[in-house]
Amino acid sequence: MSLPDNRRPPENAWQNPGPSIAVVGSANCGKTTLICRLLTLAGGQGLRVAAVKHSHKAIDPEPPGKDTWRFRHAGAQSVALACPGLLQVIHPCQDDPPLSAVLAALPRNLDLILVEGYKHSDLPKLVFVTPESAPLTGLSNILAYISDNPVGTTLPVFSRDAATAIFAFLRSWLAR
């Protein structure tokens, strides 16, 4: 995020609001489905959870011509849409936002943040491995693999459909 020096937040402002896990893998391998299942399980146990989606493609989340779109394209530094049951804040930026800035935008005191993407971050990772995809390389901090096929590793390997077991594993990891 490119901000002029007088608009930069202090370095300590980018504090992680809670434990975060990245779920990484190739497109259409099941990351979103798994994250949704884990969110449901966590919420069912009363955990405060959040989700982050990273896209390599530029998207425009607002319909062109709508008020918030017009505000942003007229030069607003941030645009908030508030309605019953929803607060959505959009912060336009020139570059791909760093993960630290994204996490800083979340509420504090979350029990778990599931991040789809940011595969080259330092976050602990659940890594999808599929026969169709090339293996991801250069990853750090891998907690476990998600695959329906054997994976040559000493780390835990879970089936794509084993959301309950994966959630139990994450609960154990969070308890450390």
Image (tube, rainbow, N blue to C red):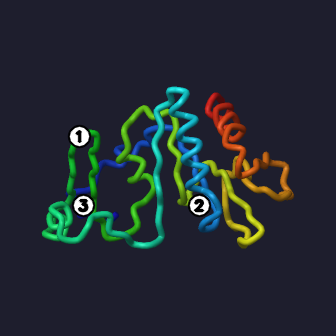
Q: Indicate which disc, 1 or 3, sits on the residue closer to the N terminus.
A: 3
Q: Is residue 84 above or below residue 81?
A: above
Q: Secondary structure at mark 1?
A: loop
Report the mark closest to the observer, 1 or 3.
1
Which amino acid type corresponds to the residue marked 3 in the rendered image? Asp
Real-space CA distance between mark 1 and mark 2, rounded to the nearest whole angstrom: 35 Å
Q: Position of residue 136 (x, y in %)?
A: 69, 67
User: Which residue in the structure is indicated by mark 2?
Assistant: 119
Which amino acid type corresponds to the residue marked 1 in the rendered image? Pro
Q: Position of residue 45 (x, y in %)?
A: 55, 27
Q: Indicate which disc, 1 or 2, sits on the residue closer to the N terminus.
A: 1
In the visual, does 119 lie left or right of 139?
Answer: left
In the visual, does 156 lie left or right of 91?
Answer: right
User: Which residue in the structure is indicated by mark 1?
Assistant: 84
Residue ID at (44%, 72%): 57
Q: Position of residue 33 (x, y in %)?
A: 58, 53
User: Which residue in the structure is indicated by mark 3?
Assistant: 5
Q: Position of residue 161 (x, y in %)?
A: 71, 48
Which amino acid type corresponds to the residue marked 2 in the rendered image? Lys
